[in-house]
Image (cartoon, grey):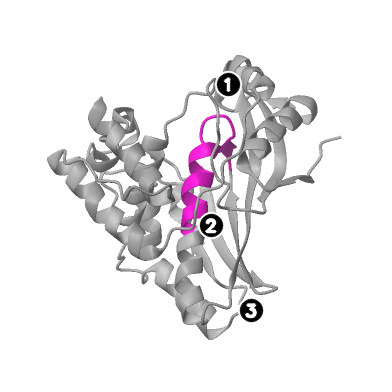
Amino acid sequence: MTSFNNVIQGDNFNSLYRTLHEVILSNGIISRPRGMEIYELLNCSIILTNPRNRLLESKVRKHSYTYACGEFFWYLRGTDSVDEIAFYLNRMRDFSDDGKTLNSAYGNRIFGIHKDFSNQWQNVVNNLIKDRDSRQAVITINYSHDLDKPSKDVPCTLNLQFIIRNNKLNMITRMRSNDTYMGLIYDVFSFTLLQEMMYNTLNEIFMKKLELGSYVHNAGSSHMYARDLEGVYAIIDEQTTSVEQSPIDNHMIDKLKTLEIDLRTNRQPLLKKGLNTTYDWIVEKLNKKLDK
C-alpha cells in the first residue's frame, strides 16, 4: 500500500538530507514519469527545526553554494532575466523559452511588480502585521496558467506560507514535485534565507518579541532518479558534521545584493569583514565565481 504520510524531522539539513534518501530507498515506490525511472515518496515533509542549519556538508555530492548564493540574490532582485542566473550556471539558458527570460523565475513571482496583482512579499508582511495569527500569509508561485502554457521551465514550487504560532515564525513550502538529490539543496538554502528575512522584518515591527520557528518542506512527489543511485549511496555512507550559520540581518543582505551586481557586471571581488559570519561565508562563495 502506498504511504501518504512521510515526515522526517531534525535540527540540521545535513542529517535530514541523508535520512530522506535512506527512506526513499527503503520505502519509495518506483514510477516512470516521462519515461525516466524514479524512486518516490508521496506527500513527504521534511521539517528543519533550526533553519539556520541549512547547509549540506559533503565531499562526495558535488554541489555549488556559489550558484546557490547567486540564485538567492537573483530571486531578491525580482527579475526573470536568464542572463543574470546564467552567469552562475550557463545551462540555465536551456530552460529559457525565448532566450531572454525564465518562465518560473521565483524571484519575479515573489518580489516582482505585476499588472494583475501587487508585490506578494509585501502582502505577506502587511497580512501578518494586521493579524499575527493569520492563515492567509501565502505567496503563490505556481500560477493557474502554468498548467496549460507550454514551457521548458514549469515551476516546481506551489506556494510559500508564513505562519506565526507559539510566538515563532514558521514557513511551509509546498512543492508539486521535488528532485531530492539535485534540487532540494538549493531550495532549502534560498527558502530558509527568505524565512530569516521575513523574520527580521516582522521582529523589528513586533519589538523583537518574535522567534525563528521551523522550516517545513512538503512535496507531493519527493523523488530521486535511478541515474543518481550511485551518488545517493555514497552520500548516505559519508560521515560529516553539520554547520549552523550565524544570523544575518536584512541590512547585510541588501548590501550583499548590491555588491553581487558589481561582482557580476564589473568582475569586482567582494571584501570580507574578517569575521566568521554568514556575511563572510556568502562573500567567499560569490568570489569563487571570479576564480574560474
Residue 219 in the figure: left or right of residue 145: right
Comparing 114 with 291, the one in front is 291
Q: Was residue 193 drawn as part of the magenta stretch in this picture?
A: yes
Q: Give how far across and how far down residue 105 sits, in percent.
A: 37, 48
Q: Name the kind of residue labelled 2 in the image.
A: Asn
What residue range appears in magenta? 177-194
Q: Give how far across and how far down residue 252 sits, in percent.
A: 34, 59
Quadrant for residue 292, please give it.
Answer: top left
Bin the neighbour count of mark 1 within 10 Å (Cα to Cα): few under 14, some 14-19, many 20 and up.
Answer: few
Q: CA distance from mark 3 to mark 1?
A: 43 Å
Dominant secondary structure of the magenta stretch? helix
**SS for callout 2:** strand
- Residue to which mark 1 is pinned: 36
Comparing 87 with 166, the one in front is 166
- Residue to which mark 3 is pinned: 133
Q: CA distance from mark 1 to mark 2?
A: 26 Å
Q: Name the kind of residue labelled 1 in the image.
A: Met
Q: Which mark is residue 159?
A: 2
Bin the neighbour count of mark 2 within 10 Å (Cα to Cα): few under 14, some 14-19, many 20 and up.
Answer: some
Is there a contact, CB below 8 Å, between mark 3 and mark 1?
no
Vertical order, 237 against 149 (above or below): above
Image point (61%, 14%), residue name: 230
**SS for callout 1:** loop
**SS for callout 3:** loop
The numbered mark, 1 or 2, whose residue comes first in the sequence reads: 1
Quadrant for residue 268, please give it.
Answer: top left
Q: Residue furthest right?
A: 1
Residue 191 in the figure: left or right of residue 224: left
Q: CA distance from mark 2 to mark 3?
A: 19 Å
